[in-house]
Amino acid sequence: SAVISQKPSRDICQRGTSLTIQCQVDSQVTMMFWYRQQPGQSLTLIATANQGSEATYESGFVIDKFPISRPNLTFSTLTVSNMSPEDSSIYLCSSPNPDDYGYTFGSGTRLTVV
Amino acid sequence: GQNIDQPTEMTATEGAIVQINCTYQTSGFNGLFWYQQHAGEAPTFLSYNVLDGLEEKGRFSSFLSRSKGYSYLLLKELQMKDSASYLCAVKGSTLGRLYFGRGTQLTVWP
């Protein structure tokens, strides 16, 4: 399985500011996925990030709010822009494992907006 | 759209067997996953079904019926450490996206 390093693990941010979350994979992967998990809820897919092309966003999520970068096959960032308390959540990245059918997740970023 | 339904909570006692059900209606199907997630941690992979039938892996088994849009995760010989949220996820037909159910919070009592 792939190993994903995600940082920061947690942050407390002021409303109106932006936070960039980074994920580094220990192998090359074609796709990376970004999820949000609100308290007590399951994972909601934000977008799919492919190297060399714009990210594909799910309904309800837009690029201006959640810009994504994917500069190479091992790295991606998600920015949460102009934050409000409603953005307080856990954000996780994920990628398909290169050698089997599973998916690996980063350890998550717990974001609190005050 | 995607609709994946599973119970919100379940309880059981140590040593018992519990079955967590999942029904799904999705646009495209390329497999169903079960993940375990302890509080504050990332989800960890438990099982994968793409064909109908039962897959067994130690104390955990997972079943799939594609015609019924139905799966279950069976946990045997429950242990306290099995207390966690269990997530059912369907792999859609486009770009390998995974769509998750709300998760079932399982509490195992001594």
Image (cartoon, rainbow, N blue to C red):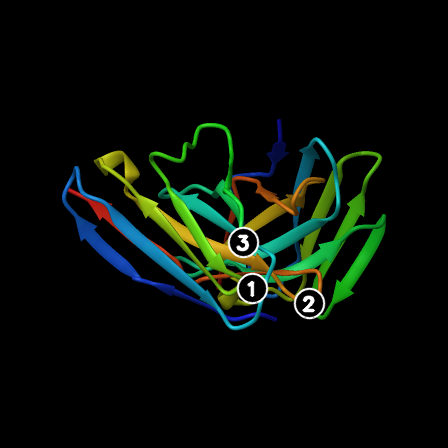
Residue A27 visible in rendering: yes
Question: Which kind of residue does numbered mark 1 sit on?
Answer: Glu
Q: What separation in Å lies between label 1 and label 3 (alpha carbons)?
A: 46 Å
Question: Viewer-proximal residue, A29 or B36?
Answer: A29
Question: Which kind of residue does numbered mark 3 sit on?
Answer: Gln
Question: Viewer-proximal residue, B66 or A58?
Answer: A58
Question: Do the CB atoms of the residues marked 2 and 1 lie less than 8 Å apart?
Answer: no
Q: Please state the horizontal and vertical placement of residue A104, each as a whole percent of the image.
A: 56, 62
Q: Residues within 10 Å of mark 3 (few under 14, many from 20)?
A: some
Mark seen at residue B14: 1
Residue at (63%, 53%) from the top-left corner?
B34
Q: Residues within 10 Å of mark 2 (few under 14, many from 20)?
A: few
Q: Please state the horizontal and vertical placement of residue B10, each as a whole percent of the image.
A: 54, 46
Question: Viewer-proximal residue, A86 or A65?
Answer: A65
Q: Which residue is mark 3?
A: A51
Q: Quadrant of the N terminus of chain B?
A: top right
Q: Nearer the viewer, mark 1 or mark 3?
A: 3
Say whether residue B55 is left or right of residue B100: right
Precedes in sequence: disc 2 or disc 1 = 1
Question: Which kind of residue does numbered mark 2 sit on?
Answer: Arg
Give a yes or no on whether discs 2 and 3 share a subunit.
no
Give a yes or no on whether discs 2 and 1 share a subunit.
yes
